[in-house]
Image (spheres, rainbow, N blue to C red):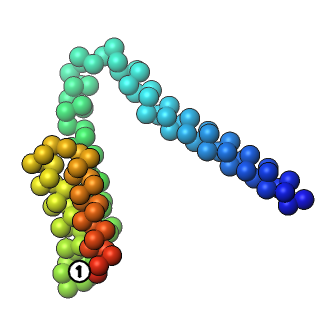
């Protein structure tokens, strides 16, 4: 009986993952397919220029507010220093992957070592 439930649960989980994957992929592809013929439109060019920076700024603010230890004596340096590393690296190298990896590594070092 347990093996039947386990097989049903596994099939259910696989189906759930497949549907979730398809839905996530569709939400990423549909805007590109829809706007591909309108790439020269000024609104699309404006969004392409400023939206990534706006989204990254929003994520940084949310990250700082939620993950920093603002009641500690160092007032959120555990979140501020990695954020500054990300901003400085991105302004210097203009490489999002490098900035994200370095910021994450810096944050994890601070969290795991207990420096702040």
Depth check: 102 or 53 in front?
A: 102
Query: Could you tell me which residue is drawn at 24 percent across and 59 percent down?
Result: 103
Expressed as whole percent of the image width and height from the top left, the position of residue 63 reads 30, 61
The residue that disc 1 covers is: 116
Q: Residue extending furthest right?
A: 1
Q: Do we see residue 7 in this rendering? A: yes
For residue 108, above or below residue 70: above
Q: Residue at x 29, y 60 (%)?
A: 104
Residue 55: x %, y % from top left? 27, 46
The C terminus lies in quadrant: bottom left
Residue farthest bottom in this picture:
73
Where 60 falls versus 76 (above or below)? above
* Residue nearer the viewer, 7 or 83: 7
Identity of the residue furthest to the left in this view: 92
Task: Report the side of 53 relative to 12 (left or right).
Answer: left
Can I make out residue 57 in this image? no
The percent coordinates of residue 93 (x first, y second) are 13, 46
Instruction: Note whether 103 is above or below 17 in the view shown.
Output: below
Q: Residue at x 20, y 29 (%)?
A: 46
Total number of numbered discs in the rendering: 1
Residue that protrudes farthest toward the top in the picture: 37
């Amino acid at each position: 009986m347990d093996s039947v439930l386990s097989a049903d649960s596994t099939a259910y989980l696989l189906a759930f993952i497949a549907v979730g994957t398809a839905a996530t992929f569709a939400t990423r592809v549909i805007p590109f397919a829809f706007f591909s013929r309108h790439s020269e439109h000024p609104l699309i060019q404006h969004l392409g220029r400023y939206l990534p920076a706006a989204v990254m700024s929003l994520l940084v603010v949310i990250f700082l507010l939620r993950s920093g230890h603002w009641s500690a004596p160092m007032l959120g340096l555990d979140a501020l220093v990695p954020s500054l590393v990300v901003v400085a690296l991105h302004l210097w190298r203009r490489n999002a992957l490098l900035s994200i990896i370095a910021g994450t590594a810096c944050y994890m070092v601070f969290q795991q070592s207990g420096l702040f």
